[in-house]
Image: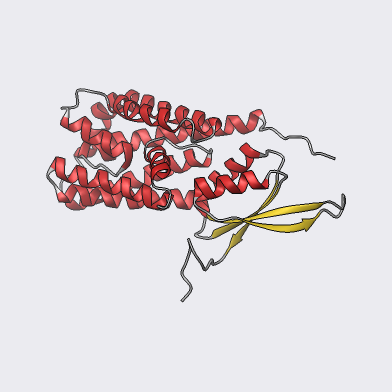
Amino acid sequence: MKRPIIKDSTTTYLVQVILILSGAMIVALSLNIFVVPYKIAPGGITGLATIIFHISGKKFPLGIIMLMLNLPLFILVLRLEGKVFILKTLFATVSLSIFTDISAPFVNRVIIPALTKEMMNDSGDLLINCLIGGLLLGIGLGLTVKAGSTTGGTDLAAVLLKKFLPRVSFGKLLFLIDCTVVILAMTVFQSVRLGLYAIITLIAQTQVIDTIQEGVDYSKAIYIISDHFEKISERVMNEMDRGATALYGTGMYSGTEKRVLLVVVTGKQISQAVRIIKEVDSSAFVIINDVREILGEGFKNIN
């Protein structure tokens, strides 16, 4: 007997919307208070927008610049990603742009002058500023990713580059894009010091996102029982750069043979894996286990 397809409830979608809006608001405040005013460009579209914002003499709102940089990426990757993911990401991107530009006047008039009296007077204060900015960016982006979305930018660019560089892992592409933007910021602002602070912000942001996504630094083993295991494994291998193994099993109630798909991913890839499974077969039976240690290709080398 075929199981009915279980759709996301209204409550689930509402929670996702709240997470995306909350994340976008936190990121916007972090950018306006701790990052952009001090020419810190921690990679990605946000970093590139920060560079353009300053070299243009702040003539264009930061949120509008981010949105304009993201729109071409949305168009280019529209056929490469699922529609639900693209719609969520578009919503998150637009929300971030709106919150950034709406909060900017208040931040510039009230918060920045108050902080200037206490912070940014020397290198030590700027370091604290970078850490706080990275922490808040990580919290905001982590909430957004938790909702199965992103704020566009680097992730979309990496998806696009993956099509032309299939042998390069997704993580390496993200790192390459972020490093390119940081180096560009060093060149444009003629300051290695600001570039190093940007790297600190980027590291803090990444650690917080990983913590929100993973909880602890464990890998995850995913067991998937689905009649569409071939399609799921194809997307996992192509989009996530992860291997998949089909195990043979038998349903004891029905007596029919089943294929159990085994996929091992890092903790921060869980949301992407679940999204792929849901898009291919929303009635799939999925088990996710913590894995203490993984030895082999794509994880830790066997010594």
- For image coordinates 42% across by 35% down, the residue present is 151
Most distant residue in the bottom direction: 303
Q: Quadrant of the N terminus?
A: top right
Q: Depth check: 114 or 165 in front? A: 165
Q: Is residue 253 above or below residue 276?
A: below
- For image coordinates 49% across by 60% down, the residue present is 217
**Image coords of residue 251 (percent x, y):** 82, 53
**Image coords of residue 222 (percent x, y):** 63, 54
Q: Is residue 11 above or below residue 35?
A: above
Q: Is residue 196 visible?
A: yes
Most distant residue in the left direction: 190
**Image coords of residue 57 (percent x, y):** 15, 27
Whether residue 280 sits left or right of residue 94 in the image: it is: right
Q: Is residue 262 above or below residue 274?
A: below
Total label count?
Answer: 0
Whether residue 266 sits left or right of residue 34 in the image: it is: right
Instruction: Quadrant for residue 24, please give it.
Output: top left
Q: Is residue 113 visible?
A: no
Coloring scheme used: secondary structure
- For image coordinates 47% across by 32% down, the residue present is 89
**Image coords of residue 171 (percent x, y):** 41, 51
Instruction: Quadrant for residue 275, please give it.
Output: top right
Q: Depth check: 71 or 190 in front? A: 71
